[in-house]
Image: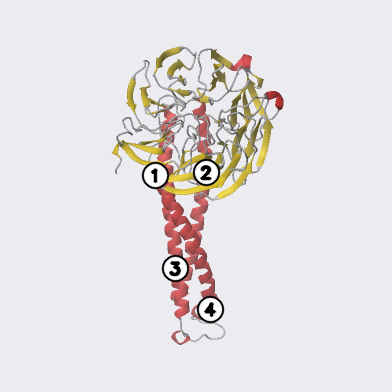
Amino acid sequence: MAAGIALVFFGVGIVIWARAERDFQKAQEQNDQRRAEWDARLQIDRTDLVLQQQVREWDRQWRARYFYHLQFQRRGLQVLALTAVLAIWVLHRGRRRRLPTVRMGGSSNSDVGFFFAHRRKLFWALLIFAGLLVVPLGRNALRFARQAEGVPGRMAISGTSAGVETPDIPTVHANRRPVIWGSFRGNEGNGIGAFTNVPTVWDGTRGESVTWTSSIPYPGNSSPIVVGDRVILTGATRTDHAVWACDLATGRELWRWHQAAVATPPETVQEETGFAAPTPATDGRVVAAIFADGDLVGLDTDGKQLWRRALGVPDNMYGHASSLVFAGNRLMVQWDQGRAEDGHSRLLALDPQTGRTDWETHRPVNASWSTPLVIPGETGVVVVLLATPWVIAYQAETGRELWRAGELRGDVAPSPVLGGGRVYALNASAPLLAIRLGGTGDVTATHVAWSISADMPDTCSPLYVSNRVFTLLSWGVLTARDAETGRTIWEKELGLNFTASPVTAGGRLYLVATDGMTVIVDLADEFRELARCPLGDPVHASPVLGDGWILLRGRNCLWRIGEGKKAEG
């Protein structure tokens, strides 16, 4: 009888658990669709405070439901496993002499007799089923614990550009870690941090407000990315390539992928470039990294190699330096090289799970070192790339060219940025262009809202925030311009050299110089320097901004800076 009750309870539990999982998957699909709609609306108008409040409230409700579901499913698996074990034990311990005699033709005790008569089959069936439950139970328990640690309590819509920073809906799916800072300059490539509580005072030379440091085993100028509870970095020499992960909380190395180079890169590279200049990218499932010689690798977030491709040594005197980005469900590789007339430049869209090419588009441009800009929209995802002589937009789904604008010249390294319905593009030999979205074909004459010819950065990417465009020259001149007209609001020489691109959070600009000094500037109508924070370690990589912390990759160490903390030891 006890076995029968346990089996009935087990069957009902399976139905409830499966229905809860099905309902949650439907709700998650609806949430993803709603978030895509909000992203598209925010791309058009980032000053909509009503919409931002709606997103905040939905984010709070969704996260509460998400973690309740995780807990429910985990507890459900535990209860089902215990019920199965109980039924197995009762059947195994059952004795014929303890059960009533089974009468032919059936009786009121026929159910009990049935369980007894088939106890061996039921025993083995339940034993196998319980064994199958143990595997997902352990896997889900581990995944739930990691996701609960990795999802911060306060998220934000990265990319808010009106000086208002609001909580974001985290990118969380089954078997996917939440993407905190997933590519060069953040998830949207705009350098805007999601939190207002970013540190403003530290001194690395004295250990003040330094939470931890982690040594850099391989040189590189790529920026860190953060997925869940881990920080991902890349490094390389001429003969060796490496990708590794550090624990976000402690700095302890969690895993390392290390392989010999598959090609022969240039004999020498500039310090500002190196053999590991491109920043890796992640969608929460796959970590993709590329090196100067075209060695491209896909790993899972635990460091297991999924695939590896050798694109070949590019015709590029600095080595490949364009960072990777995800656009929709594809990995984008800006593979520009040689001169336009050579016909070697192209944009590749890869399946991130396998590394296979979904499509590729040839580009009529010279070699470049810029990173693609990904723009979600109501009609699909658009990818914008810079290289002499064109700014070109492509449809991410197919690679079809949508529009192009001219005027780029020379070596292009800064990446484009989106703000106020415009793409802002520049390089040292060309003007700053404000290009309205839309149009087809060559839109140089119709969609360039304005262009400014002045000294422009050769390395640092522009920053759009609070309806202003900030540019930072390598020799330390910071300029704030009105995004509507291009008019200069103020300009200041900082007396430092820079290769890291500026970032912003909490109404402040963070500018990290090559000697490790961070200059913090107020987002105001007049230049106002708030602080200078030394690190004591040279920096070429752009910083990562998080919830109460900053990550800085120096030449010697990865630094986590936390407000009001002092490094131990």
Q: Position of residue 568 (x, y in %)?
A: 29, 43
Q: Is residue 443 rendered to the left or right of residue 12?
A: right
How dense is the environment of label 1, judged by Cα within 10 Å: few (below 14), some, or many (20 and up)? some
Query: Distance between the Cα atoms at labels 3 and 2?
Result: 47 Å
Q: Residue furthest front?
A: 267
Query: Distance between the Cα atoms at labels 2 and 4?
Result: 54 Å
Q: Which secondary structure lies at badge 1?
A: loop
Q: Position of residue 541 (x, y in %)?
A: 46, 32
**Amino acid found under the numbered disc labelled 2:** Ala
Report if residue 474 is visible in the image: yes
Q: Mark 2 — residue?
A: 242
Q: Earlier in the sequence, mark 3 or mark 2?
A: 3
How dense is the environment of label 3, judged by Cα within 10 Å: few (below 14), some, or many (20 and up)? many
Q: Which secondary structure lies at badge 2?
A: strand
Q: Residue at point 49% right, 15% down? A: 484
Label 3–label 1 contact, CB within 8 A: no
Q: Residue 512: which quarter of the image?
A: top left
Q: Mark 4 — residue?
A: 120
Q: Mark 3 — residue?
A: 83
Q: Earlier in the sequence, mark 4 or mark 1?
A: 4
Report if residue 300 is visible in the image: no
Q: Position of residue 473 (x, y in %)?
A: 47, 20
Identify whether 118 is placed above or below 211. below
Q: Mark 1 — residue?
A: 251
**Amino acid found under the numbered disc labelled 1:** Gly
Give the quarter of the figure containing the C terminus: top left
- Which mark's residue is nearer the viewer, 3 or 2? 2
